[in-house]
Amino acid sequence: MSAGKASVARGRAGLAGGPRQAPRTPCFTDGTLVATDKGLVAIENLQPGDRVLTRDSGYRAIMWIGSRKFDADELSLYAELQPVVIEKGALGADTPSRTTRVSPHHRMLLSGEAARAIGGESEILVAAKELTFRPGIRQGGQPTVTYFHIMFDDHEVIHADGCWSESFLPEASVLDQMSRAQRQEILAVFPELALDEYITSYAPARLCIDSAAMVRKLAA
């Protein structure tokens, strides 16, 4: 993908018609420390154009940032919106390096034997909600949460809170659940995503696993 190089945008928009259904959007939460070429920066302080450390492409410029706050009433009504809490070291030695919180559908990078057991590859991306059977990983307990999306010219694996996880991937099911305003912000940067064939060409950085059955092979 390359159309995003012409412009950048930042937005704070809601879901289409409000949170009548829980979004599948993969997101970080406020307070997450993201590795950039200027050191660690809290995600809420990042701007389009800032350069973030990626696993595959070095430092890459952010093309779009979006955010959405969920209050106590929304989280009470839709418990599935609650973030997944991953304690320090729950994904490996000092990984993450501090407790991190992500949206349930945000995918975390697994590597080595764990990745091969689930997906047959050396590295895979797994939805955080499917990892809650592991010690130190749980969902819920937040009175409010603000979710942040970071998008690049390509789907990337980025370093945040001392572990690797995905950037925003504009899947059709995700875009459909975003507000019209937020979709328009993304299309202003990536106009080709208005066509279904271009959405599918925005390839995932790794094999993405969202199946609970596949992930729970590790628990067997």
Image (cartoon, rainbow, N blue to C red):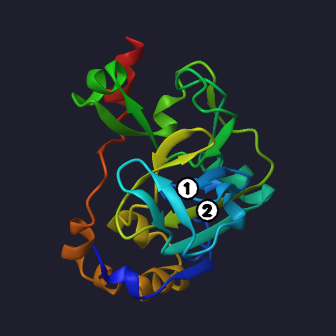
Residues tagged 1 and 2 counted as in contact (Cβ below 8 A): yes
Q: Is residue 200 left or right of residue 183?
A: left
Image height check: is 24 above or below 150? above
Q: Residue flagged by tag 1: what amino acid is it?
A: Cys
| Mark 1 residue element | loop
Q: Is residue 38 left or right of residue 181?
A: right
Location of the C terminus by quadrant is top left
Q: Which mark is residue 148?
A: 2
Q: Residue sitting at 32 percent across and 83 percent down?
A: 3
Q: Quadrant of residue 132?
A: top right
Q: Residue sitting at 37 percent across and 64 percent down?
A: 173
Q: Which mark is residue 201?
A: none
Residue extending farthest top: 220
User: Residue 154 appears at what percent x and percent y?
Assistant: 34, 65
For the residues labelled 1 and 2, the Cα–Cα distance comes to 5 Å
Residue extending farthest front: 38
Pointer 1 residue = 27
User: Residue 78 appears at what percent x and percent y?
Assistant: 64, 52
Q: Is residue 85 left or right of residue 187?
A: right
